[in-house]
Image (cartoon, helix red, strand yellow):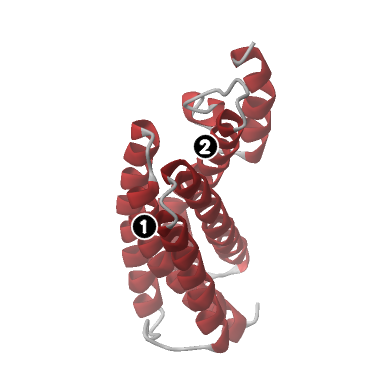
């Protein structure tokens, strides 16, 4: 395993979580559906914890959490762009549209976040000794929550869009109802939505 690239992954993961905090804070302002708002408030708390987990992991590896890298700068820019997109939507004066934009921004952010943690899990499997133990502990604490953030977020975005189109929507989405935490579970929940909306 390339140590320097692992460090880059961890710095990008930390930046993703830090941007995620700002994204959820803004998304909560866009939320109109009370169930969605409640879920995002929970995810904000979890994301704040994920930031702490990463800071602790980085420090345990004798690295500086403030280290800047070009990749980290790009991740920061993307996160700020998602916040800006939601602010633009809020400024438009169309609350339903702002909520849809927020769901999409959350899914985009959580896609990168989920990817980071999946890669950290892969690194944990190949690492040895203290590094393996540290990566496994961090991954074990966060992974299930990241799965939920991505799959539930995608369900909310899909169903709120369907509702906005005037079509029968399953709200809360089946991913939420079935507490989905895997890609297979998300696919099954999505397929089951047809039954829920008949």
Quick check: 110 left or right of 47? right
- Relative depth, front residue between 57 and 72: 72
Looking at the image, residue 62 lies above or below residue 188: below
Residue 156's disc number:
2
Residue 191 appears in the rendering: yes
Do callouts 2 and 1 mark residues in contact (Cβ within 8 Å)? Answer: no
Q: Quadrant of the C terminus?
A: top right
The disc, 2 or 1, on the residue closer to the chain's N-terminal end is 1
Residue at 35 percent across and 73 percent down: it is 55
Q: Quadrant of the N terminus?
A: bottom right
SS at circle 1: helix
Residue 26's disc number:
1
Residue 130 appears in the rendering: no
10 Å neighbourhood of mark 1: few (<14), some, or many (≥20)? many
Residue 24, image x, y percentages:
38, 55
SS at circle 2: helix
- Relative depth, front residue between 33 and 148: 33
Residue at 51 percent across and 83 percent down: it is 73
Residue 61, image x, y percentages:
41, 79
Looking at the image, residue 125 lies above or below residue 148: below
């Amino acid at each position: 395993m390339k140590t320097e690239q692992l460090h880059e992954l961890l710095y990008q993961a930390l930046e993703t979580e830090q941007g995620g905090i700002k994204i959820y804070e803004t998304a909560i302002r866009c939320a109109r559906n009370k169930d969605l708002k409640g879920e995002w408030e929970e995810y904000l708390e979890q994301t704040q914890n994920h930031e702490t987990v990463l800071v602790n992991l980085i420090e345990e590896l004798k690295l500086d959490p403030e280290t800047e890298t070009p990749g980290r700068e790009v991740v920061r820019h993307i996160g700020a762009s998602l916040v800006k997109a939601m602010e633009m939507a809020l400024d438009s004066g169309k609350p339903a549209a702002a909520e849809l934009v927020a769901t999409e921004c959350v899914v985009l952010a959580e896609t990168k976040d989920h990817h980071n943690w999946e890669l950290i899990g892969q690194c944990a499997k190949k690492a040895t000794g203290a590094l393996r133990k540290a990566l496994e502990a961090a991954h074990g604490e966060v992974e299930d929550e990241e799965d939920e953030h991505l799959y539930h977020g995608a369900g909310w975005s899909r169903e709120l869009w369907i509702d906005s189109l005037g079509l029968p929507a399953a709200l809360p989405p089946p991913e939420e109802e079935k507490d989905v935490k895997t890609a297979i579970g998300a696919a099954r929940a999505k397929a089951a939505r047809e039954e829920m909306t008949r």
